[in-house]
């Protein structure tokens, strides 16, 4: 049974049980406090908390997810950065809602009757009770009632059988996991538990479905964690598509399923080194490239910060392993084309953004390829010198130099150091980074107000800056209208003479595109659009279509500025009252300033 069929069977089953099938949300979540969508339930948090009335009482989806916590584990049989999480939900409202009993029955019915897995290989874990959260006796009795004997029901604490919240606070609850006994041949390590069973490190038992009983809203009061009952009890489940595919195909690894085999075969042809010779390198390249394609399709571009840093980190890690396998220049492109072809019928954004994906990959490979070889030489020299002196720790100055001069993410240096039996301390790297920033900032004026307004500026100069700042909002929207919604603000600088606006895009604008953007801004200025200011919860602002950017961390309540019905952004800065106050907008220069970053300089006449 192939992955596409598994996904379809899952969604069709729940559709037949009265669930609304909800499309996957973006990997960039509405919640600015987290970098990525890492669980199927994230788009439903307002419903789970009871803040918003859901339009349906039951839902199911196959959600694309990206997790950063397991990056260092990628290379084993089952860890991934990008993965699909299939799940079903009941939101505790209406006559069709359900809780533990129905969730358990639905899971067993699907696994037995649709995926044809034998119940006698199911083991179950439940919450044993910890702190103020009681033992889940109800689940224990329900599993027994549904044919799972007592000896195959194991109880664990908060670490294993309490799920959530996604962030520090929010919806959470005890969970019950279904584990599958793959048999003795799947044991890869010594048992870590007496008598073996679920959560044993040997690898024989693998979790295939997590049923979360969302009953609590976690809050923080000082140093104390408080678990308050949610207004309604919810069901939130998750079954990883990759893992389920591996089990249903009786494979020893997710990477041996058709989700990865075509890419792995291509790597083998390009490198001349077999998969068996270096499984880790193959797996890292395949996983990281697949994740990169999905991140770029959702508008993430390589950079030094936040999401962009993660993308750059996994791409450069993949390129380093490509170097180990002796892969040719620009090897990312043919591999990415395989993933795009494989997923485009389900995730249409991959075909729509294919050119963007391939261009970003090409640019990043060209950019890092020029310095990778020299950086590796510098690393080897440093290692030889340190080992010759009998030292075991790479100084922060070296790890920072590899980052600053050769583009090596800290984690890449850390991984290479570990392979040599050396350590590199993050605090030493951070100290070197901080010292560099202090030198860079020396002599800079202290500014305030978000526009670089200084205390000694005249009223006329301040008004000029406010006009230019307002114009950046129109410029930003015009760029998105012209180039697409992958455009995101990367930074801005305003003085009394001009505005400078940096944005993400994979190539320089054409003359026609530049002219179109300029004309669009001037058209909106002439329309005399009213500039409105509102305050509202951050989540409400995002739901209303306001643009916000991951470089910032927003408070719970934010200021939103709208220019007519044209532009809406989360922004705390000062603005004019009407677009007519701006005068005439003129673009002076458009230039590419880095991989995936374009700069516009413009004035108001």
Image: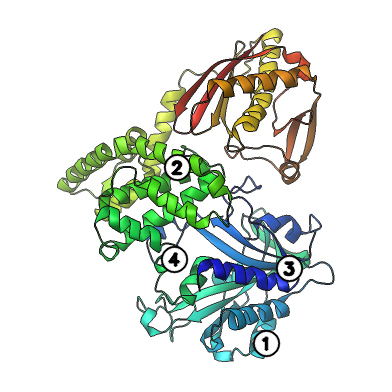
Disc 4 target residue:
258
The answer to whether mark 3 and mark 1 are in CB contact below 8 A is no
Instruction: Label 2, secondary structure: give it.
Output: helix
Asked if residue 283 can be seen in this view, the reply is no
Which of the 4 quarters of the picture holds residue 364?
top left
Query: Sequence-wise, which precedes: disc 3 or disc 2?
Result: 3
Q: Residue furthest right?
A: 95
**CA gap, disc 3 and disc 2:** 37 Å
Q: Residue at x 63, y 67 (%)?
A: 87
Query: Sequence-wise, which precedes: disc 3 or disc 1?
Result: 3
Query: Sequence-wise, which precedes: disc 4 or disc 3?
Result: 3
- The local crowd at label 2, few if under 14, some if 14 to 19, many if 20 or more residues have their Cα within 10 Å, is many
Disc 2 target residue:
358
Callout in the foreground (3, 1)? 3
Disc 1 target residue:
141
**CA gap, disc 4 and disc 3:** 29 Å
Asked whether, in this view, residue 17 is left or right of residue 504, the answer is right
Callout in the foreground (4, 1)? 4
Q: Residue furthest left?
A: 388
- Picture disc at residue 19: 3
- The local crowd at label 1, few if under 14, some if 14 to 19, many if 20 or more residues have their Cα within 10 Å, is some
The answer to whether mark 2 and mark 1 are in CB contact below 8 A is no
Is 372 in front, or is 177?
Answer: 372
The answer to whether mark 4 and mark 3 are in CB contact below 8 A is no
Instruction: Label 4, secondary structure: give it.
Output: loop
Instruction: Label 1, secondary structure: give it.
Output: helix
């Amino acid at each position: 049974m192939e992955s596409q069929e598994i996904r379809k069977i899952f969604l069709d089953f729940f559709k037949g049980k009265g669930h609304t099938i909800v499309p996957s949300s973006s990997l960039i979540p509405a919640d600015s406090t987290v970098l990525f969508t890492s669980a199927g339930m994230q788009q439903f948090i307002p419903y789970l908390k009871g803040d918003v009335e859901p339009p349906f009482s039951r839902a199911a989806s196959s959600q694309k997810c990206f997790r950063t916590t397991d990056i260092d584990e990628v290379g084993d049989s089952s860890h991934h950065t990008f993965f699909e999480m299939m799940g079903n939900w009941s939101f505790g409202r209406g006559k069709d809602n359900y809780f533990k009993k129905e969730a358990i029955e639905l899971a067993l019915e699907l696994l037995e009757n649709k995926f044809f897995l034998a119940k006698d290989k199911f083991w179950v874990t439940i919450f044993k009770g910890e702190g103020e959260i009681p033992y889940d006796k109800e689940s224990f009795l329900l599993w027994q009632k549904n044919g799972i004997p007592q000896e195959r029901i194991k109880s664990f604490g908060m670490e294993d059988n309490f799920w959530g919240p996604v962030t520090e606070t929010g919806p959470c609850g005890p969970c019950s996991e279904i584990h599958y006994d793959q048999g003795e041949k799947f044991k890869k390590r010594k048992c870590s538990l007496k008598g073996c069973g679920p959560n044993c490190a040997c690898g024989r038992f693998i979790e295939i479905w997590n049923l979360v009983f969302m009953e609590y809203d976690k809050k923080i009061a000082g140093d104390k964690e408080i678990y308050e009952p949610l207004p309604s009890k919810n069901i939130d489940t998750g079954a990883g598509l990759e893992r389920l595919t591996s089990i249903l195909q009786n494979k020893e690894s997710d990477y041996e399923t058709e989700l990865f085999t075509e890419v792995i075969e291509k790597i083998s042809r390009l490198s001349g080194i077999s998969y068996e010779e270096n499984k880790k390198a193959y797996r890292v390249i395949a996983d990281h490239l697949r994740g990169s394609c999905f991140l770029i399709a959702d508008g993430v571009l390589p950079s030094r910060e936040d999401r962009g840093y993660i993308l750059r980190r996994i791409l450069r890690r993949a390129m380093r392993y490509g170097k180990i396998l002796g892969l040719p220049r620009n090897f990312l492109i043919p591999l990415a084309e395989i993933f795009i072809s494989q997923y485009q019928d389900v995730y249409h954004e991959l075909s729509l953004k294919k050119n963007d994906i391939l261009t970003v990959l090409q640019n990043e490979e060209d950019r890092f390829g020029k310095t990778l070889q020299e950086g590796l030489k510098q690393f080897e020299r440093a290692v030889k010198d340190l080992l010759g002196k009998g030292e075991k720790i790479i100084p922060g100055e070296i790890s920072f130099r590899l980052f600053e001069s050769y583009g090596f993410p800290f984690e890449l240096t850390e991984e290479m150091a570990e392979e040599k039996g050396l350590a590199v301390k993050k605090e030493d790297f951070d100290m070197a980074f901080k010292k560099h920033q202090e030198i860079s900032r020396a002599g800079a004026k202290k500014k305030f107000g978000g526009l670089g307004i200084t205390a000694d500026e005249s009223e006329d100069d301040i008004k000029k800056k406010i006009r230019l700042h307002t114009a950046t909002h129109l410029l930003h929207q015009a760029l998105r209208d012209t180039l697409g919604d992958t455009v995101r603000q990367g930074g801005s600088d305003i003085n009394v003479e001009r505005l400078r606006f940096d944005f993400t895009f994979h190539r320089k604008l054409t003359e026609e595109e530049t002219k179109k953007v300029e004309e669009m801004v001037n058209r909106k200025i002439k329309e005399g659009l009213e500039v409105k200011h509102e305050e509202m919860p951050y989540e409400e602002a995002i739901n209303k279509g306001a643009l916000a950017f991951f470089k910032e961390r927003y408070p719970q309540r934010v200021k939103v500025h709208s220019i007519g019905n044209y532009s809406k952004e989360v922004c705390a800065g000062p603005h004019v009252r009407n677009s007519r106050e701006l005068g005439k907008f003129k673009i002076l220069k458009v230039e590419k300033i880095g991989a995936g970053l374009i700069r516009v300089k413009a004035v108001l006449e």
